[in-house]
Image (tube, rainbow, N blue to C red):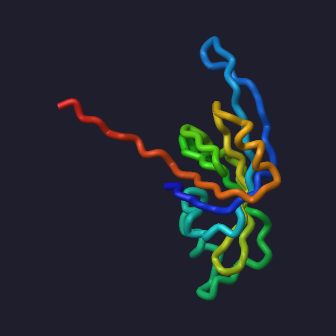
Amino acid sequence: MLDLKATAEVRGINVRAEMHNEDIQPAFDVKLMLIAVDVKALSAFCPNMDKHFYDAEGLVTVGEVSPLTVTHKIENITASIGSFSHIGCDIKKGAKITLLPEWRANVEVQVQCQSGDVNTVLKHLRDEVKVTLTERQLDMVSNG
């Protein structure tokens, strides 16, 4: 389950068009660098990262680690980037996690948004922003 709040830098935005049925709709990808995230909050990327890569004092135990690459996609998240908020985003596979001391990590992710106001995100380019990435909960409805 992903429930992540972090300070981030917007590193880039890629605007594109997508076909939905017979309609062309705007979509965009936002490249973010999440800064000094608590590794326990990264369990959706790598469960028990704190136990795999850190000792009891919070030092990285596997020496100098190249960024870890996440091999799966996380779908259907809610992304809030500064004043922009959008439901139904995806985090593309290939996110890079660079381990830091004291159970922290920098995380480079690319968030795919199927539609929305790209101009709101563009105004945060090169600024530090508050980012929240949360997996959406599906409601179970009983007909009985």
Q: In which quarter of the image is the C terminus?
A: top left
Position of 123 relative to 45 (above/below) = above
Residue at (49% x, 55% y) in the render: 1
Q: Is residue 71 above or below residue 99?
A: above
Q: Please tell me which residue is depicted at 77% across the width and 42% down the height of the picture.
A: 122
Q: Which of 140 and 116 is in front in this view?
A: 116
* 52 lies above or below 139: below
Residue at left 62%, top 45%? Answer: 73
Residue shown at the point (65%, 50%) measured from the top left: 81
- Please state the total of marks drawn on the protein image: 0
Q: Is residue 6 left or right of residue 78?
A: right
Nearest the eye: 9 or 71? 9
Percent x, y for residue 61? 69, 81
Is 54 situated above or below 117?
below
Residue 7, x across and y down, in percent: 68, 62
In the figure, is residue 143 to the left or right of 73? left
Name the one closer to the observer, 112 or 50: 112
Q: In which quarter of the image is residue 64?
A: bottom right
Q: Which residue lies furthest to the top in this view?
A: 22
The residue sitting at the left extreme is 144
Q: Where is residue 6 in the image (x, y as percent from the top left)?
A: 64, 62
Residue 18, quarter of picture: top right
Residue 32 percent across, percent down from the top left: 73, 52
